[in-house]
Image: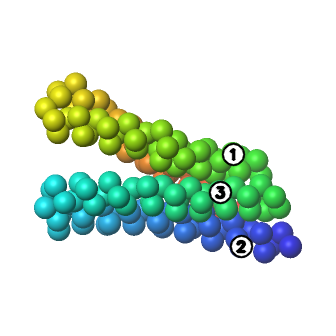
């Protein structure tokens, strides 16, 4: 049974890393390369909630699998739980604030533009840390 749970765990962690890497390295850049800036911004605003939801659910599956019977321990469970929490925070806490700041900055509010830039940097930083954490957990599956 532990082997089956490990398979679910490694598949969910692998899918999570692959989805995150694809989104950051290929999908999001292509949106801004191929679409007009205004259209790209509106489109990506619609994509982010889906991205955060899909990655949040995938990371929750990884937490459940690793935490309930995988051969991996508490460190990997905790790392994936933090990754999962990061997605939920980004979706429900950070993303609405980013969108409000962006809307206000487009109305000429210079303070809102600086707030948007800061919040955007925070979201990129969180995503980068998550990507590294997921890669470390994935590597630990390979080396265990």
Query: Can you tell which of label 2 and label 3 is closer to the viewer?
Result: 3
Whichever of callouts 2 and 3 sits on the residue coming sooner in the sequence is 2
Decide which of 144, 88 is in the foreground and name it: 88
Side (left or right) of 137 relative to 125: right
Q: Quadrant of residue 136?
A: bottom right
Residue at image point 65% right, 48% down: 81
Side (left or right) of 38 relative to 1: left
Q: Quadrant of residue 66?
A: bottom right
Q: Which residue is mark 1?
A: 78
Q: Which residue is mark 2?
A: 7
- Rate crowding at label 3 as few (under 14), some (14 to 19) or many (20 or more) other CA atoms within 10 Å: many
Whichever of callouts 1 and 3 sits on the residue coming sooner in the sequence is 3
Provide residue 64's location: percent of width, then percent of height: 73, 58
Give above or below for 5 relative to 96. below
Residue at image point 59% right, 50% down: 84
Q: CA distance from mark 1 to mark 2?
A: 19 Å
Q: Which residue is mark 3?
A: 60
- Rate crowding at label 2 as few (under 14), some (14 to 19) or many (20 or more) other CA atoms within 10 Å: some
Provide residue 72's location: percent of width, then percent of height: 76, 57
Would residue 137 be seen by someone viewing this image from the given angle?
A: yes
Secondary structure category for the residue under label 1: helix
């Amino acid at each position: 049974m532990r082997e089956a749970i490990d398979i679910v765990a490694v598949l969910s962690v692998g899918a999570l890393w692959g989805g995150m890497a694809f989104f950051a390295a290929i999908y999001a850049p292509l949106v801004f390369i191929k679409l007009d800036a205004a259209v790209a911004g509106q489109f990506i605003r619609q994509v982010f909630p889906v991205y955060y939801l899909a990655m949040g659910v995938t990371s929750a599956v990884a937490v459940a699998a690793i935490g309930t019977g995988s051969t991996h321990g508490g460190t990997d469970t905790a790392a994936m739980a933090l990754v999962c929490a990061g997605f939920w925070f980004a979706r429900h806490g950070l993303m609405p604030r980013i969108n409000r700041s962006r809307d206000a900055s487009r109305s000429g509010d210079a303070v809102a533009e600086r707030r948007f830039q800061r919040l955007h940097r925070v979201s990129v930083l969180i995503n980068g840390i998550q990507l590294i954490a997921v890669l470390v957990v994935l590597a630990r599956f390979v080396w265990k």
